[in-house]
Amino acid sequence: MMHRSLDHGRRPPPGSARRCRAAMPLAVVLLAFAAPAAAQQTVSDVLSFLLTNRTILTDDFDRDEEAAAMTGSTIASFVVLELATLPVASSSGGFTYRLDPALGLDVRASDSFGPFFTERTLTSGSGHAAIGISYRSARYDRLGGRNLRDGTLVSTASRLDGESEPFDVETVTLLIRTDTMTVTGSVGVTDRLDLSAAVPVVRVSLEGERVDTYRGSVFTQASGAARASGIGDAVVRARYNLLRGRASGLALGVEAHLPTGDEENLLGSGRASIAPRVMASYEGARVGLHGDVSYSLRGIARTLGYGGAVTVAATSRLTMVGEVVGRRLDGVGRLVSTTLPHPRLEGVSTIRLTATPETTQSVMAVGGLKWNIASSWLLTANVVRPLTSAGLNADWVPTIAFDYEFGE
């Protein structure tokens, strides 16, 4: 739902507004009597509304529209990237098995239950399968180091030359939250080959306000809210254990993201992607080191992903995990403020929030545990903390998951 309001008592800046007085009444009438937006809107519609519903007269419609479109596209892209390209739980099940020739039986290949997101090289074992369900909740506070929630994100402003502060400022506040429940499954086709899939069910909510502050007078210019839920982009993966020695080794894999989510409501990217992956692991009696590298060839952005993890098998039923997960995104962009002279008013400059395409890099730290609570049930709990300001960030992102292993 979207709402628009307008203050009829605004005054143009003295000494520079003489030329815009004739235009001001017309703008007031158009905005005041504009038809209200439809009650049901997509998340993209509301985001666009909040970024384009301005009252500051810049006299440069094309540049305004371009800036708003680039800003909205960048914010939307980062929401989708958080949902569609962040790594889901490792495709390898917590329980891994290998055939012991001396016993003629499958035995656990490692006392460790493996990392959260970084892939390890051990496979589940022929005939062994696992299913799981996880829940993750995130409330996003910042985008590229800019605060989205405290009303300091300047969308458009006018400033007199020689003054440090604008006399008219429009700011945007955005409250973005995502809740994701993901169903996962994996199966050992052979002792060296695993197949897996993940299907997320996503809920996205966005609320926002656009506030105009004119020479100390504050009024709400526009507000909007939208919520959407549904299936996100599904993931299918394959992994082949190329070299192995006990629990250590080298593996190759591939990961594909399918465009099953609603793009208009930011539930999915609208594009398929495929990413080859290389994985390496070293596991001792209790401590394991794992690393992987992947590169997305298609999708919303070309993405170089990487991860490293340390696992400690505290007991045969409890594994402690620490990870660093990163990604480099080509061409997604970042928010910037541009300042240009007003085309008709001397001594007035217009400040716009826009975006510039460039390579960004984000890194996250992950910590938590995996606990074999009973039989073949595994409880996983972790927290993600961003280490860089690039992209859309939440202070803490908790995840909890349950997995069940079964097989021959």
Image (tube, grey):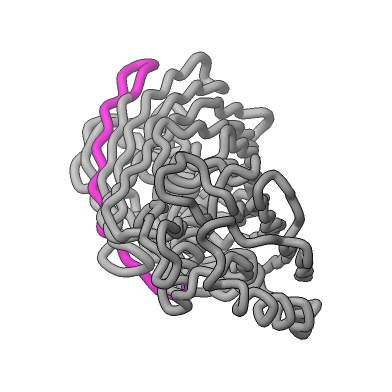
189 vs 76, nearest the viewer? 76
**Residues drawn in magenta:** 270-288
Is residue 153 visible in the rendered structure shown here? yes
Residue under the image location 46 percent in, 54 percent down: 127
The percent coordinates of residue 146 (x first, y second) are 49, 42
Image position of 273 with respect to 99: above or below: below
When asked about the image quadrant of residue 147, the answer is top right
Q: Is residue 279 magenta?
A: yes
Image position of 4 with respect to 15: above or below: below
Residue under the image location 67 percent in, 28 percent down: 373
Residue under the image location 30 percent in, 60 percent down: 357
Horizontally, residue 127 falls left or right of residue 278, namely right
When asked about the image quadrant of residue 108, the answer is top left
Q: Is residue 136 magenta?
A: no
Residue under the image location 51 percent in, 52 percent down: 129
- Type of secondary structure dominating the magenta stretch: strand
106 vs 179, nearest the viewer? 179
* In the image, farthest residue toward the left: 243
Image position of 48 with respect to 348: above or below: below
254 vs 173, nearest the viewer? 173
The percent coordinates of residue 391 (x first, y second) are 43, 47
220 vs 101, nearest the viewer? 220
The percent coordinates of residue 333 (x first, y second) are 35, 57
